């Protein structure tokens, strides 16, 4: 039997059509993959954006100026009685020193007896502010603590340095209070007044 030329030519055409369909399918698949890749490339990375935002300064931090603090002078103001080293022929072994800023007063080595209200008021009148009251109260406390003694006071220094010790000597005119003032170049904005108060045994 002889083969018909028309039938033998139909098979190659079928194969060509199948190949064309297969190629179109592959092309479509590749195109879809390409579109997906482009989408991934253009997507923003949230981690990178967050890192970039955190690295950028949010603004210049405000710097508040430091407020200067004033250093307090330990010798400023009024001071309660502080014990001071005491020697001398009067036999007085204890004394206190009072101080105040710009309290005035006249320096004298002679001690004044502060055994009455009038005597305390007269001695306190030389001082400014409430320093005179402090001196009077301290002398009164001395008398109350030891009724067998008489309280005395002397303005021993007006300046930047107070006494580190005193010598109380008994003389014909009364008690003499000689202060030991440290030698220094210390400067102060206002002078200090130093008063030594002590009690001497009654004769």
Image (tube, rainbow, N blue to C red):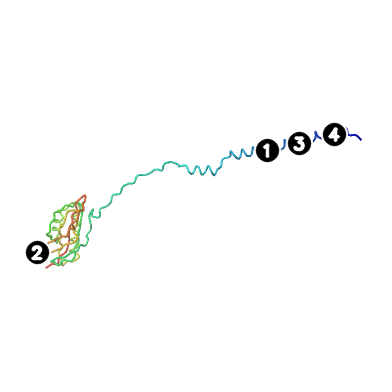
Q: How many marks?
A: 4
Mark 1 to mark 3: distance in Å? 16 Å
Q: Is residue 37 left or right of residue 126?
A: right
Q: Residue at the spot x=68%, y=38% of the render?
A: 30
Mark 1 to mark 2: distance in Å? 125 Å
Q: Mark 2 or mark 1, which is nearer the start of the sequence? A: 1
Mark 2 to mark 4: distance in Å? 160 Å
Task: Say few, some or many: other residues with alpha carbon within 10 Å of mark 1 (under 14 / 14 to 19 / 20 or more).
Answer: few
Q: Circle 3 sits in a helix, a strand or a loop, which is it?
A: helix
Q: Circle 2 sits in a helix, a strand or a loop, which is it?
A: strand
Q: Mark 4 or mark 2, which is nearer the start of the sequence? A: 4
Give whichever of 92, 68 is nearer the camera: 68
Residue 57 position, x and y percent, is: 45, 42
Q: Nearer the viewer, mark 4 or mark 3?
A: 4
Mark 4 to mark 3: distance in Å? 18 Å
Location of residue 176 by image quarter: bottom left
Q: Name the residue beneath numbered marker 3.
A: 19
**Which disc number belongs to residue 39?**
none
Q: Name the residue beneath numbered marker 2.
A: 171
């Amino acid at each position: 039997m002889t083969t018909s030329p028309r039938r033998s030519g139909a098979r190659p055409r079928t194969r060509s059509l199948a190949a064309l369909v297969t190629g179109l399918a592959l092309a479509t698949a590749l195109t879809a993959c390409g579109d997906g890749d482009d989408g991934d490339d253009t997507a923003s990375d949230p981690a990178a954006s967050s890192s970039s935002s955190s690295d950028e300064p949010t603004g210049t931090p405000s710097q508040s100026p430091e407020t200067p603090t004033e250093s307090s002078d330990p010798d400023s103001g009024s001071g309660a009685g502080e014990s001071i080293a005491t020697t001398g022929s009067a036999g007085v072994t204890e004394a206190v020193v009072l101080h105040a800023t710009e309290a005035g007063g006249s320096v004298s080595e002679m001690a004044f007896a502060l055994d009455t209200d009038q005597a305390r008021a007269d001695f306190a009148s030389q001082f400014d502010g409430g320093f005179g009251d402090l001196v009077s109260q301290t002398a009164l406390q001395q008398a109350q603590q030891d009724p067998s003694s008489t309280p005395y006071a002397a303005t021993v220094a007006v300046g930047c340095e107070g006494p580190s010790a005193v010598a109380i000597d008994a003389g014909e005119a009364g008690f003499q209070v000689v202060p030991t003032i440290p030698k220094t170049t210390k400067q102060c904005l206002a002078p200090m007044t130093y008063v030594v108060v002590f009690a001497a045994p009654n004769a």
